[in-house]
Image (cartoon, helix red, strand yellow):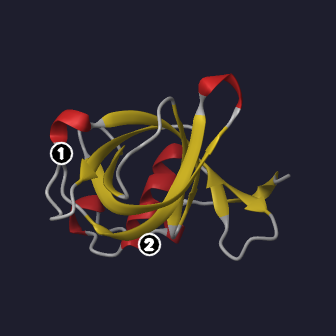
Amino acid sequence: MSTIVPSKFLTSQDVPSAGLAAETDPRSLVLSLLVAHGGGLYAERRRDQRFAFPQLVRLVPLDEAGDVVEDEAVVVAGKHLSEKGLGFFHQEPLPYRRVLATFETTGTESVSLELDLSWCRFVRGGWYESGGRFIGIGRDWS
């Protein structure tokens, strides 16, 4: 089980100040999201640090051609966020392998990252937990 290390929190100094609109690196976008939502570092055995991310995230499926399937978009509850991926909870199995994960930042801004879903498991109470790796930057679909 992971524990929060209170002395190690991200600050705005950890993120380039160019602004989210100018970001082209998924790592910088994820760090910006963590700063905006006050994520704390976790001490754990995994290779990548995960951050608690109890925020709503909008997933828009991508079909095999890479086109969005807007009418099948869902909102999921974030669990953990790392520089390389996202873990989240949802109420129904997801039939798509690739999605655009849209994160609200500050005000009316949002950021979308393409996510390759690699795992899913059923957890208690009729919920599922899934996750995957970021594979690129998407556009804002809000």
Q: Residue at x 42, y 67 (%)?
A: 134
Residue neighbourhood size for the residue with mark 2, other residues' Cα within 10 Å, grouped as few (<14), some (14–19), many (≥20): some
Taking the image as shown, residue 101 lies to the left or right of residue 39, namely left
- Foreground residue among 23 and 47: 47
The amino acid type of the residue labelled 1 equals Val
> Which quarter of the picture shows residue 53?
top right
Find the distance from the CA under tag 2 to the CA under tag 1: 26 Å
Judged from this view, the residue extending furthest toward the top is 125
Q: Position of residue 98 (x, y in %)?
A: 33, 59
Quadrant of residue 108 within the rendered picture = top left
Q: Which residue is mark 1?
A: 69
Which amino acid, by three-letter code, is at mark 2?
A: Arg
Question: Mark 2 sits on what residue?
Answer: 27
How many residues crowd mark 1 within 10 Å: few (<14), some (14–19), many (20+)? few
In this view, the mark in front (2 or 1): 1
Disc 2, SS: helix
39 vs 134, nearest the viewer = 134
Q: Give how far across and how far down residue 97 sits, in percent.
A: 37, 58
